[in-house]
Amino acid sequence: MRFRKPTVEPVDINLTPMIDCLLFLIVFLLLSTTFNHFSKLNIVLPQAEGVPITEKDQRVEVSVQKDGSYLVNGIALVGTGEAELTSMIRQETGDNRKLLFVISADANTSHQSVVKVMDVAGKMGFLNLNISTVVPAGAVSDTPNKTKSN
């Protein structure tokens, strides 16, 4: 009996279908991926459009200067502490907490100084708290560049 020698077929790996699948996956991923473009937020801050004050009511006006110092109804304070501010406001208003409380601050003053005035006014019990602004030069108004309160 004669046995046949087993024939050894050469081992051959066909890479063509695998490359086709990989290219298909790459094309699919490129088409389905979105690319995020991060950009800056362009924020346009609103201008104040309050009503101009027509009559001079009895009011308390606290001005906050650029360096953080305070003026209460035009009278400069010695210090910048909360105690000095409270005592000067109490001296100007007495016990009347229904007066109009106006805060006018320099554009370059620190936010902390303005918040300190708001905090003092709240602790003292003032209800009518306004922030004074200036009408922009291009705005339509009967009295341009006049101080307004909001």
Image (cartoon, rainbow, N blue to C red):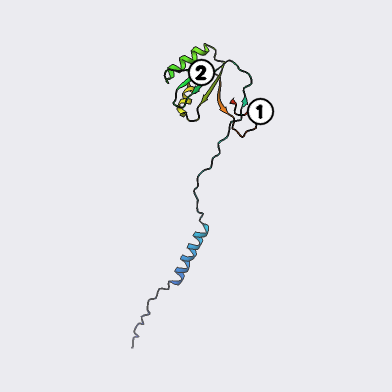
Query: Residue at horizontal 56%, vertical 27%?
Result: 133
Amino acid type indicated by mark 1: Asp
Q: Nearer the viewer, residue 5 or 124?
A: 124
Picture disc at residue 142: 1
Image coordinates of residue 97 in percent, x first then y, are 54, 15
Picture disc at residue 48: none
Q: CA distance from mark 1 to mark 2?
A: 27 Å
Residue wearing tag 2: 74
Query: Residue at horizontal 45%, vertical 72%?
Result: 16
Q: Nearer the viewer, residue 14 or 133?
A: 133
Query: Residue at horizontal 62%, vertical 25%?
Result: 52
Query: Residue at horizontal 43%, vertical 19%?
Result: 82
Q: Are marks 1 and 2 in contact (CB under 8 Å)?
A: no
The reply to whether residue 116 is in sight is yes
Look at the numbered disc 1 and give the secondary structure of its residue.
Answer: loop
Q: Sort mark 1 into few (<14), some (14-19) or many (20+) by Cα contacts within 10 Å.
A: few
The reply to whether residue 149 is in sight is no
Look at the numbered disc 2 and give the secondary structure of its residue.
Answer: loop
Image coordinates of residue 124 in percent, x first then y, are 50, 17
Q: Place residue 77 in its image quadrant.
A: top left
Is residue 105 positioned above or below 56 on the image? below
Quarter of the N terminus within the rendering: bottom left
Q: Nearer the viewer, residue 115 or 136?
A: 136
Quarter of the C terminus within the rendering: top right
Is residue 33 positioned above or below 16 on the image? above
Query: Which of marks 2 and 1 precedes in the sequence?
Result: 2
